[in-house]
């Protein structure tokens, strides 16, 4: 459905009916309603705008549904969101994505998360080496440890 059609449907149905229909279509597509959408169901404006935003991102991505789901698995794993990860593994499985591809997405996420930890920590370590522990100024400019030491 196009963005314009989604907006038209919301205007015709009204926000409460549109929100109920959105939840039904999500359940039909995923086999369940994600918790965050259940939480939003009492606030149709937030639910509708969240789903419109999600749909716009997916439509503009140029990615197929299985690739989007594998990315969702990987991001959920990297963020360590167990609720999201369980949901996206179930959705991926229901979409027919093989377990080895789901596992590959998890392993890639773990590898990137590990690299992120290492990159961040080693950069901070390098930056801290350049700072005088006494005056907290860059070592080269520091009168205690730098060139101006006299």
Image: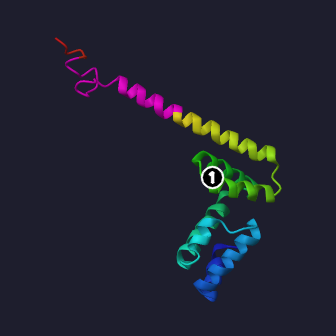
Q: Can you give x and y, in whole percent of width and height, for residue 78 in the image?
A: 60, 45
Quarter where residue 130 is shown: top left
Q: How many labels does the image show?
A: 1
Q: Which residue lies furthest to the left in this view?
A: 150
The N terminus: image quadrant = bottom right
Residue sitting at x 65%, y 83%: 9
Depicted 121 relative to depicted 67: above or below:
above
Q: In this view, does 74 lie to the left or right of 149?
A: right
Task: Give the image's coloring scheme.
Answer: rainbow
Q: Can you give x and y, in whole percent of width and height, for residue 48 in the image?
A: 58, 75
Q: Can you give x and y, in whole percent of width and height, for residue 89 in the image?
A: 73, 54
Q: Name the residue under label 1.
A: 82
Depicted 38 relative to depicted 118: above or below:
below
In the foreground, 8 or 129: 129
The C terminus: image quadrant = top left
For residue 1: magenta? no
Q: In this view, does 148 lie to the left or right of 44?
A: left
Quarter where residue 55 is shown: bottom right
Residue sitting at x 56%, y 72%: 40
In the foreground, 150 or 133: 133
Residue sitting at x 66%, y 61%: 58
The magenta segment: 118-144
Say which element carries label 1: helix
In the foreground, 107 or 80: 80
On the question of residue 52 being in view, the answer is no
On the question of residue 123 being in view, the answer is yes
For residue 143: magenta? yes
Q: Which residue lies furthest to the top in this view?
A: 150
In the foreground, 113 or 49: 113
10 Å neighbourhood of mark 1: few (<14), some, or many (≥20)? few
Residue sitting at x 36%, y 23%: 129
Q: Can you give x and y, in whole percent of width and height, for residue 118 in the image?
A: 52, 31
């Amino acid at each position: 459905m196009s963005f314009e059609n989604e907006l038209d449907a919301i205007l015709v149905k009204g926000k409460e009916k549109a929100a109920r229909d959105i939840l039904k279509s999500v359940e039909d597509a995923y086999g369940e309603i994600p918790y965050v959408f259940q939480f939003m169901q009492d606030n149709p404006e937030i639910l509708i705008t969240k789903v419109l935003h999600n749909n716009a991102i997916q439509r503009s991505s140029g990615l197929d549904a299985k690739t989007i789901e594998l990315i969702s698995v990987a991001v959920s794993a990297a963020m360590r969101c167990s609720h999201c990860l369980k949901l996206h593994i179930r959705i991926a499985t229901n979409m027919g994505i093989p377990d080895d591809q789901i596992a590959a997405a998890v392993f890639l996420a773990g590898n990137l998360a590990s690299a992120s930890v290492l990159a961040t920590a080693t950069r901070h370590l390098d930056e801290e080496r350049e700072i005088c522990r006494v005056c907290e100024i860059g070592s080269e400019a520091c009168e205690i440890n730098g060139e101006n030491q006299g």
